[in-house]
Amino acid sequence: QVQLVESGGGLVQPGGSLRLSCAASGSAFSTYTMGWYRQAPGKQRESVAVITSSRRINYADSVKGRFTISRDNAKNLVYLQMNSLKPEDTAVYYCNAKYSFLEREYNYWGQGTQVTVSS
């Protein structure tokens, strides 16, 4: 069982920045694929940024050039630096951890943190 705890959300004006953090339990954190997802009211949850154990990264087109995902394996942390925020970035942001073991895939979610971009 992997527990994920997000922090760093809040209210920010358009053009501002926030940094989200996700603390993960487990001794095998470095092997997890970690990701940030978001869900806006009335919309489906979508992938924002994903970083693999080998630090391969993918971003949603809507956040490329504005958001940066990173991980600190020594501290079991993953970050999402969000710059040039727009009102359409408003959503609940969720941390996700995935790993495979003995041909079975495991998938865990945090409780989410609210990000509101508004003037």
Image (spheres, helix red, strand yellow):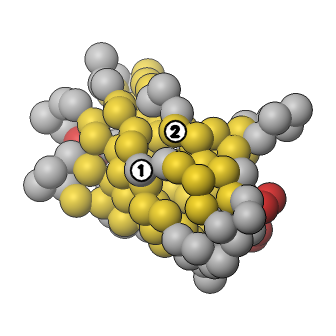
Q: Nearer the viewer, residue 102 or 53?
A: 53
Q: Are marks 1 and 2 in contact (CB under 8 Å)?
A: yes
- Assign a secondary structure to mark 1: loop
- Assign a secondary structure to mark 2: strand
- Neighbor class of circle 1 (other Cα within 10 Å; few <14, some 14-19, many 20+) is some
Q: Which residue is mark 2?
A: 113
Residue plotted at (21% across, 46% down): 76
Residue plotted at (31% across, 25% down): 3
In the rendered image, the quadrant that contains the C terminus is: bottom right
Residue 36 in picture, x, y percent from top left: 53, 49
Looking at numbered disc 2 in the image, what kind of residue is underneath it? Thr
Identity of the residue furthest to the right in this view: 42
Q: Which residue is mark 1?
A: 8
User: In which image quadrant can residue 58 be found?
Assistant: bottom right
Residue 102 in picture, x, y percent from top left: 33, 23
User: Is residue 30 in view?
Assistant: no
Residue 17 in picture, x, y percent from top left: 53, 71
Residue plotted at (52% across, 33% down): 112
Looking at numbered disc 1 in the image, what kind of residue is underneath it? Gly
